[in-house]
Image (tube, rainbow, N blue to C red):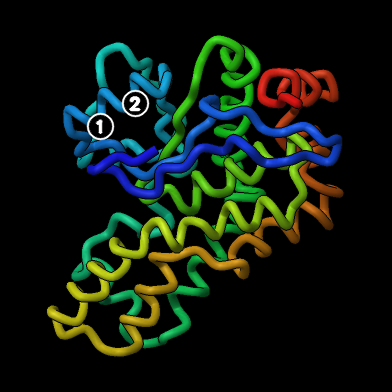
């Protein structure tokens, strides 16, 4: 889906599963924030069939950049954090004091964030609400879910969905890494702004780490999911509270031959 005023928009359809089925198109779409949608963008969403948007951002992020959606689309907020833990929406000057001394600080921060995404109490509650919404409304709703850049909070939820549906983890990782291609221009602009603001090389390196996705980050979460819980589906049962019947229902809603 090509929206002129939104980034990192991608459909989770078309991925093959372990039982030979495919994820349905037009049912689950990932994205960055929807604050600046043009009239054409809104029409594209409606014509694509999107009738529900789940906003994973915090109250502060939403107050700063509220979604600009057509009135026909249901809006649901399910925040994964109380603030933007990923720093993806922070301005350069706010970040300077944290990331100008050590070029590895951005990478370290993101590793911590992804571990929180795996076993944090607030993400746990958010996952419970998110998956219950899919179970209760997925048959009649085509859902777009997003955070600020569509890369971390959105990326992990997309990975959990694909795992629940039986998509191989290698394929899930390739979907996750698509973010770097889709947000390239955004990352480039952030770095250009930092250079123009005379930020040092350590800051630039950390800014890149904060603004992109990495398999290091993915693996920080999935090491916990795989080795502590025994894989995505068991994680969803033990940590999120889904049942075997719930996972079967998700597959019935979102898979096709």
Q: Position of residue 207 (x, y in %)?
A: 35, 73
How far apart are the alpha carbons under marks 1 and 2? 6 Å
Q: Position of residue 112 (x, y in %)?
A: 56, 64
Residues tagged 1 and 2 counted as in contact (Cβ below 8 A): yes
Front-most of residues 118 and 222: 222
Can residue 60 be seen here? The reply is: no
Residue 103 vs 72, above or below: the answer is below
Would residue 231 appear left or right of 129 to someone viewing this image? right
Secondary structure under tag 2 reads helix
User: Quick one: quadrant of the N terminus?
Assistant: top left
Residue denoted by label 1:
41
Q: Residue furthest front?
A: 257
Query: Which residue sits at x=37%, y=51%?
Result: 149
Q: Position of residue 140 (x, y in %)?
A: 55, 10
Q: Position of residue 157 (x, y in %)?
A: 58, 41
Residue denoted by label 2:
45
Query: Which residue sits at x=66%, y=49%?
Result: 119
Query: Which residue sits at x=82%, y=48%?
Result: 231
């Amino acid at each position: 889906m090509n929206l002129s005023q939104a980034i990192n928009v991608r459909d989770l359809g078309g991925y093959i599963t372990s039982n030979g089925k495919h994820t349905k198109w037009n049912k689950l779409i990932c994205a960055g924030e929807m604050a600046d949608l043009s009239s054409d963008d809104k029409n594209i969403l409606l014509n694509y069939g999107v009738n529900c948007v789940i906003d994973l951002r915090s109250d502060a992020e939403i107050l700063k950049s509220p979604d600009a959606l057509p009135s026909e689309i249901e809006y649901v907020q399910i925040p994964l954090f109380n603030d933007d833990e990923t720093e993806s929406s922070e301005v350069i000057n706010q970040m300077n004091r944290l990331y100008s001394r050590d070029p590895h600080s951005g990478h370290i921060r993101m590793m911590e964030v992804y571990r929180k995404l795996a076993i944090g109490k607030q993400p746990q509650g958010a996952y419970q609400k998110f998956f219950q919404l899919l179970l209760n409304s997925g048959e009649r709703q085509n859902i777009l879910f997003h955070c600020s850049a569509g890369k971390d909070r959105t990326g992990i939820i997309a990975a959990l969905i694909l795992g629940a549906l039986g998509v191989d983890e290698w394929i899930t990782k390739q979907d996750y890494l698509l973010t770097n291609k889709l947000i390239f221009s955004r990352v480039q602009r952030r770095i250009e702004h930092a250079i123009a603001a005379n930020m040092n090389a350590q800051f630039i390196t950390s800014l890149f780490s904060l603004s992109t996705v990495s398999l290091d980050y993915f693996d920080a979460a999935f090491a916990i999911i795989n080795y502590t819980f025994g894989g995505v589906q068991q994680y969803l049962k033990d940590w999120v509270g889904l049942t075997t019947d719930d996972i079967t229902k998700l597959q019935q809603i979102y898979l096709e031959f």
